[in-house]
Image (tube, helix red, strand yellow):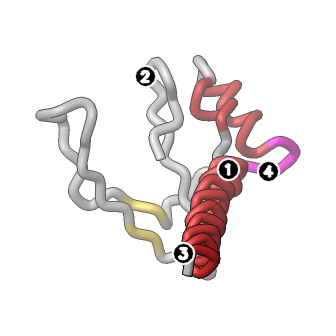
Amino acid sequence: MTNMKRRVFLKGMLTAGGAVCVGMLVPQAVLASWPVTAFTANSLDQTLKDLFAGESIAESAKISFPELPTLAEDARSVPVNISTTLPKVSRITLLVAKNPRPLAA
């Protein structure tokens, strides 16, 4: 009977240890794709270089902000609605030129 208790204990510990290891690996994979240098850049030019190195950037009248607040009640959280008529948009990057850290989202 002692061997059975030990086997159950070891099996439980190995299962729990495996779950912990998997949980530790997933956040690293997610954080690896986060553009750290772009979020910590101090200037708009540096942020653009970090995000779009080698890509062409163009302004478009097909992107609009229908409900943009003139003054944020809470600077940590500003609700923004963005709409576009551009086809096949897969990513939108929000930059705030006058912020100490221009990359907002």
> Which residue corresponds to mark 3?
5
Residue 74 in which image quadrant: top left
What residue is rendered at 60% in x and 70% in y?
A: 6
Q: Give whichever of 33, 90 is nearer the camera.
A: 33
Circle 2/circle 4 CB separation < 8 Å? no
What residue is rendered at 66% in x and 58% in y?
A: 21
**Residue type at the position of mark 2:** Lys
Q: How many marks?
A: 4
> Which residue corresponds to mark 2?
98
Does label 2 or label 4 sit earlier along the sequence?
4
31 falls in the magenta region: no
What residue is rendered at 45% in x and 34% in y?
A: 96
Crowd class of label 1 (few under 14; some 14 to 19; many from 20; radius 10 Å): few
Crowd class of label 3 (few under 14; some 14 to 19; many from 20; radius 10 Å): few
Residue 5 visible within the image: yes
Q: Is residue 11 above or below residue 19?
A: below
Task: Find the residue positioned furthest to the front.
Answer: 1
**Residue type at the position of mark 4:** Ser
Circle 4/circle 3 CB separation < 8 Å? no
Does label 3 or label 1 sit earlier along the sequence?
3
Does label 1 or label 2 sit earlier along the sequence?
1
Tell me the magenta residue range: 53-57
Q: In whole angstroms, how far apart are the C-alphas of marks 2 and 4?
A: 22 Å
Q: In whole angstroms, how far apart are the C-alphas of marks 2 and 3?
A: 64 Å
